[in-house]
């Protein structure tokens, strides 16, 4: 991947950080999602909603090429980050993943100390600054510092699920990414932890672009600026393929959806 | 198929739990498995007691450090004991790095394609090949082909042959241990911009070490008890001097090991030799116990350190 400057200089892409052009997503021969066209605005929160199995996670995982880890997974199309094709030879997936962080559905802290959970990413990416300071800053950024400041040496698994998820967010922001991908980050959490993470997202928006997958309609309306609704339909061969139905400002998706399927889904009349 | 309406309406009369009968079957299986366990323990206890009764009287420091002899009361196991230890060291030094390395490569790095599948099936099959076949392979490969390094039929060839023998077991154990580490850990590491090796080394491998250790120690325990393959590559029944840890010592054509010494004494007609064979068996069992204890100790240290 090239220097930051070369990315910033692509004037036409200034408003959108990611651009997906007519992309199909495959697992082996199975086409999971077809024909996605999408632009992700910078420093905004974009929500992905849709019924289970329609391919939200699949689309999300391709933004940092984490789908490369799944054998057989590939795409047919073009996904650009700052105007550069992320699947082109010039792009190093390791460097891409540093700039596009991810928080998973199930909190997955490393079975190491809270401190090391955060320091790991910084160390491998050659962080030169003061590590203690970075750990504190990241934990404060994830609204977790006050709860764990006295037990930084304890295992990341010894805290509650909601705290673990915020630890994962702290871990993600410790390496100063530009984008944070979140795959149902609150699905395992209680309403209070969920609220904390939503507040956190509002703060993070200042500095980061966020894409969040959620099954919670209220959450999408509360946090997101734009919303993409995905659906799945049966193909001739009997399998299901996902596709992007509608993508618009969140307010429009929920108040004035253009598509009937969207209207049914956001009003809870779906399936 | 029952229609949803009907199955939803079914009342408790449709169910016949037959609790008494199910509890009876429960008990029957409990008794059967208990008897299976017991028969194993009884046989083991009889064996161990017999050996202890026969062997303990002759156990002494002199017995450990004396060479074998035609007179049973003067005979000792020093060459065989040292031979077994050196074989074990050579075997471990060769098989652990290669086996664990191969396991890591196959599980974490190799693409899941036809070639990988063929290799996988082959390795699993190799683990089931009789040890005498490995002996013949070792004789050809280390005794002849690489004779200029190993000195032909020598303790070095023996150790290398045993390493070959347990390599598949270590590879399979390593892969199984790595497989049991959840993918979410790999995803978490890679999503932070770690390379594959960084992820494996710092997060995956530490979680897999206990499993790898268990498999490796079991494999080494098997190696230390083997006789057939090392006889083929040159182990002799009567070696009056102990091997030395020099290049020449390792290439020395005459060496022996505890199982071979034991076999040799047991096959003699005199009762006295049977008794010292029992003593040698006790020494072999102590070596195995120490190995297993070490493994458990290291494993626990690993587990508490995370
Ligand atoms: N690792 C995989 N290998 C093969 N197929 C997969 C894999 N992951 C997902 N799929 C398939 O791709 C399709 C989309 O799955 P995906 O997980 O992206 O859906 P989703 O919208 O995230 O669903 P959910 O809301 O339940 O998380 C499904 O048909 C699924 O079976
Ligand atoms: Mg999903």
Image (cartoon, helix red, strand yellow):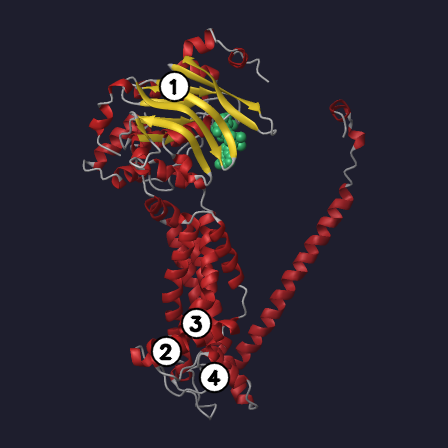
The residue depicted at 39 percent of the width and 16 percent of the height is A223
Q: Which of marks 4 and 3 is nearer the N terminus?
A: 4
In the rendered structure, the answer to whether residue A82 lies left or right of residue A217 reads left
Q: Give the label, 3 or 2, closer to the camera.
A: 2
Q: How far apart are marks 2 and 4 (CA)?
A: 39 Å
Q: Which of B181 and A225 is in front in this view?
A: A225
The residue depicted at 49 percent of the width and 78 percent of the height is B259
Q: Give the label, 1 or 4, closer to the camera.
A: 1
Q: Mark 1 lies on which chain?
A: A
Q: Give the label, 4 or 3, closer to the camera.
A: 3
The secondary structure type at the circle numbered 4 is helix
Contact, CB < 8 Å: mark 1 with mark 3? no
The residue depicted at 41 percent of the width and 57 percent of the height is B102
Res B171 → quadrant: bottom left
Contact, CB < 8 Å: mark 1 with mark 2? no
Contact, CB < 8 Å: mark 2 with mark 4? no
Q: How far apart are marks 1 and 3 (CA)?
A: 61 Å
**Viewport quadrant of the C terminus of chain A:** top right
Q: Which residue lies furthest to the top in this view?
A: A256
Q: Mark 3 lies on which chain?
A: B
Q: Which mark is residue A46?
A: 1
Q: Which of marks 3 and 2 is nearer the N terminus?
A: 2
Q: How far apart are marks 1 and 2 (CA)?
A: 69 Å
The residue singled out by tag 4 in the image is: B58
The residue singled out by tag 2 in the image is: B147
In the rendered structure, the answer to whether residue A116 lies left or right of residue B264 reads left
Q: Where is residue A106 in the image (x, y as percent from the top left)?
A: 45, 32
The residue singled out by tag 3 in the image is: B161
């Amino acid at each position: 991947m090239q220097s930051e400057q070369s990315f910033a200089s692509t004037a036409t892409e200034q408003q959108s950080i990611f651009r997906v052009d007519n992309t199909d997503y495959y697992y082996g021969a199975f086409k999971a999602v077809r024909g996605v066209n999408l632009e992700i605005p910078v420093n905004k929160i974009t929500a992905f909603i849709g019924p289970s199995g329609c391919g939200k996670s699949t689309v999300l995982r391709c933004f940092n090429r984490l789908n490369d880890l799944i054998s057989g997974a590939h795409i047919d199309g073009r996904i650009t980050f700052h105007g550069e094709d992320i699947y082109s030879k010039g792009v190093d997936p390791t460097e891409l993943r540093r700039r596009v962080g991810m928080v998973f559905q199930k909190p997955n802290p490393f079975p190491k100390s809270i401190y090391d959970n955060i320091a790991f990413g910084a160390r491998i990416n050659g962080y030169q600054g003061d590590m203690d300071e970075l750990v504190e800053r990241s934990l404060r950024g994830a609204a977790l510092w006050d709860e764990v400041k006295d037990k930084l040496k304890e295992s990341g698994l010894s805290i509650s699920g909601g705290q673990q998820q915020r630890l994962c967010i702290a871990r993600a922001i410790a390496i100063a990414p530009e984008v944070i991908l979140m795959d149902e980050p609150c699905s395992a959490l209680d309403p209070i932890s969920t609220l904390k993470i939503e507040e956190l997202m509002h703060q993070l928006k200042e500095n980061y672009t966020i894409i969040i997958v959620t099954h919670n309609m209220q959450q999408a309306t509360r946090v997101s600026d734009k919303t993409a609704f995905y659906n799945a339909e049966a193909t001739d061969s009997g399998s299901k393929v996902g596709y992007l139905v509608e993508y618009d400002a969140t307010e429009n998706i929920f108040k004035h959806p253009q598509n009937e399927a969207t209207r049914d889904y956001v009003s809870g009349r779906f399936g | 198929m029952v229609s949803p309406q009907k199955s939803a309406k079914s009342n408790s009369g449709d169910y016949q739990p037959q609790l008494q009968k199910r509890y009876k079957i429960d008990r029957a299986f409990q008794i059967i498995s208990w008897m299976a366990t017991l028969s194993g323990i009884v046989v083991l206890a009889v064996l161990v007691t017999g050996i202890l009764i026969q062997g303990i009287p002759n156990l002494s420091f002199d017995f450990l450090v004396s060479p074998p002899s035609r007179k049973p009361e003067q005979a000792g196991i020093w060459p065989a004991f040292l031979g077994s230890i050196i074989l074990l060291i050579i075997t471990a030094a060769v098989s652990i790095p290669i086996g664990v390395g191969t396991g890591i490569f196959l599980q974490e790095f190799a693409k899941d394609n036809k070639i990988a599948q063929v290799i996988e099936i082959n390795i699993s099959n190799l683990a089931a090949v009789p040890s005498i076949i490995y002996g013949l392979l070792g004789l050809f490969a280390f005794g002849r082909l690489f004779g200029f390094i190993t000195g032909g039929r020598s303790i070095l060839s023996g150790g290398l042959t045993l390493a070959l023998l347990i390599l598949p077991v270590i590879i399979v154990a390593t892969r199984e241990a790595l497989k049991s580490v959840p993918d979410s850990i790999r995803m978490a590491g890679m999503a932070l911009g770690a390379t594959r090796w960084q992820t494996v080394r710092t997060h995956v491998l530490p979680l897999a070490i206990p499993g790898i250790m268990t498999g490796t120690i079991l494999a080494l325990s098997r190696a230390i008890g083997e006789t057939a393959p090392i006889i083929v590559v040159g182990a002799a029944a009567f070696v009056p001097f102990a091997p030395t840890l020099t290049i020449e010592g390792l290439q020395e054509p005459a060496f022996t090991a505890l199982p071979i010494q034991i076999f040799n004494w047991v096959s003699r007609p005199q009762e006295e030799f049977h008794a010292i064979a029992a003593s040698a068996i006790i020494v072999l069992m102590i070596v195995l116990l120490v190995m297993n204890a070490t493994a458990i100790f290291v494993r626990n240290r690993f587990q508490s350190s995370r």
